[in-house]
Image (tube, rainbow, N blue to C red):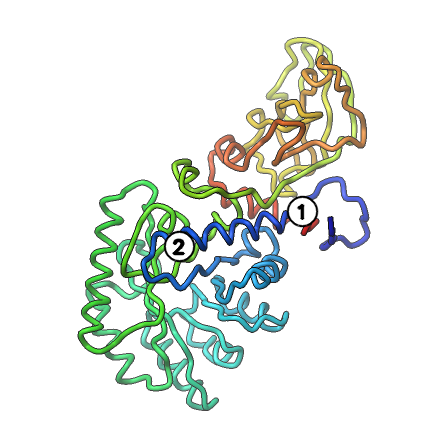
Amino acid sequence: MDVKILNFETVVHPPTWCEIDLKALAHNFEQLQKLATKNMSHSVGIMPVIKADAYGHGMVQVAECLRECGCKYWGVSNTSEGVFLRVTGFNEKILLFESTLAAEAQDIVEYKLTPTVCDLEMAQALDHCSQRAGAQTPVHIKIDTGMGRLGINEEEAVGFVEKLRGECPHLILEGIYTHLPVADTDRDFTLGQMRRFRDIVYSLENQMITFSYVHAGNSMGLGDYKSELFNLARPGIMIYGVYPLDELKKKVHLKPVMSVKARIIFVQTIAKGRGISYGHTFKAKEDITVAVLSIGYSNGYLRSLSNKAFVLVAGVRCPVVGRVTMDQIIVDVTAATLSGRIPKIGDDAIIMGAQKGASVSVDEIAQWADTITYEILCSLGNRLPRIYHS
C-alpha cells in the first residue's frame, strides 16, 4: 500500500494522527455518481464540496484523488480557498459558495473562479473586472427559498436575473441554485422549496434565460429527493463516507474516509475511591487500570466528551473517564486487561475507526458530544497530522 505522510514537521512518529483512506473516497465518489444518475433524470454528475480543508480531510489531497476519478467541478467556501486550489495547480471548475464582497471581484476574474451572485453590486464589480480583462465570467445565482442566509429573495429572483442579463454583459449566467436546510427533518417544507424554485427556473426559461447547471441537492437532497429539474448535486458529508440520515444506508453504500488513532503514553492502576482528572468528576468505584492517550481538546477532541465517550483499546470499547484535558484523555482499560489483552505504552488506541472487529463511528462521537458529525471531522482533521493511504 502506498503511504504518504503530510503535515509532519519534526515528529516522524506522531503520538496522535488521522488516517485518510483515498480508496474509500474514490469508492464514495463512484457510488454518489450512480446515485445522482438515478435521482436526477438529466444528471451531469456531482460537484463534491471540499471547503473547510475538505471537512478536515485535506483539500489538496482530496482534490487530487477526485480529479483522478474524473471529477470536473468542486465547491468551496470562499475566494481564498478557490485561489489556493488554483495556485496549487488545479484547473477544474471551482464554485465559490460565499462570494458577496465586491472587493474580491478582481481575484475571482483573474483566477477564473465561478462566484455565487446574489447582490447587484457584486455582479457589477465582476462585470467591470471581466470587461477590463477581456473575459467572460461564469456565475451561479443563489436563490433563498428558506435557508435565510445568502441568496436573493425568491420573490425578487426573476427580476434580479433579468437585470443581470441586461446590465452585466460580461457575465455568463451558468448556474442557478438554492439550498435545502431541513431536507432531513421536514420533507413537506423541502418539497415546497423545490416547487417554488422550479417555478422560478421555468419563469426564467419563458424569458429565454436558461442555465447549464441547476442544483439544490446537498448530501441529503441528493440521497432522498428525486428531481427532473436538477442536473447537478453537491454532496459534502457523504463524499467522506458519513450519512446525514441512517435511512440512506439502504440507498447507497459508503465507506468512512477518516479514522483517528492515538498511542498509549502511560498505564497505571487507580485505587478504589481515587478521583481522576480536573475536578474529580470521575471517582473509581473499584480498583481499575487506566491508560493515558495523547489527545485532548487542543487536538479537536471536544471537552464535552468527558465521561461520555469510548475508544478502542486492543479491540475492546473502553470509556473515557474524567475530564478531557488540553492534550490528554484518560481511559479505563480494565475490560481490555480482564480479557487478557494487556495494554502497553506505545500501543495504538482507536479514537475513531475500527479495530479487531469493533468500531467507534463519527456518528457516535457526535452524539456523545451533543453536536454534528461535520464538527467532529473538522475539529479532528484540521488539528491532527494526516497520513494518506491510496
Label 2, label 1: how many angstroms apart (C-alpha)? 33 Å
Local crowd size for mark 1, using a 10 Å CA cut-off: few (<14), some (14–19), many (≥20): many
6 in relation to 109, above or below: above
284 in relation to 387, above or below: above
- Mark with earlier residue (2, 1): 2
Disc marking residue 361: none
22 in relation to 85, above or below: above
The image position of residue 367, as x and y in percent, is 48, 32
Q: Nearer the viewer, mark 2 or mark 1?
A: 2
The image position of residue 252, as x and y in percent, is 44, 43
198 in relation to 110, above or below: above
The image position of residue 56, as x and y in percent, is 58, 51
Residue type at mark 1: give it. Answer: Leu
Q: Which residue is mark 2?
A: 36
Q: Which residue is mark 1?
A: 384
Judged left or right of residue 11, residue 82 is left
Asked if the residue under mark 1 is in contact with the one under mark 2, i.e. CB atoms within 8 Å, the reply is: no
Name the residue: 80% across, 44% down. 13
- At mark 2, the secondary structure is helix
Q: Nearer the viewer, residue 134 or 228?
A: 228
Residue type at mark 2: give it. Answer: Ala
Name the residue: 48% across, 74% down. 113
The image position of residue 259, as x and y in percent, is 63, 41
Name the residue: 22% across, 73% down. 205
Q: How many marks?
A: 2
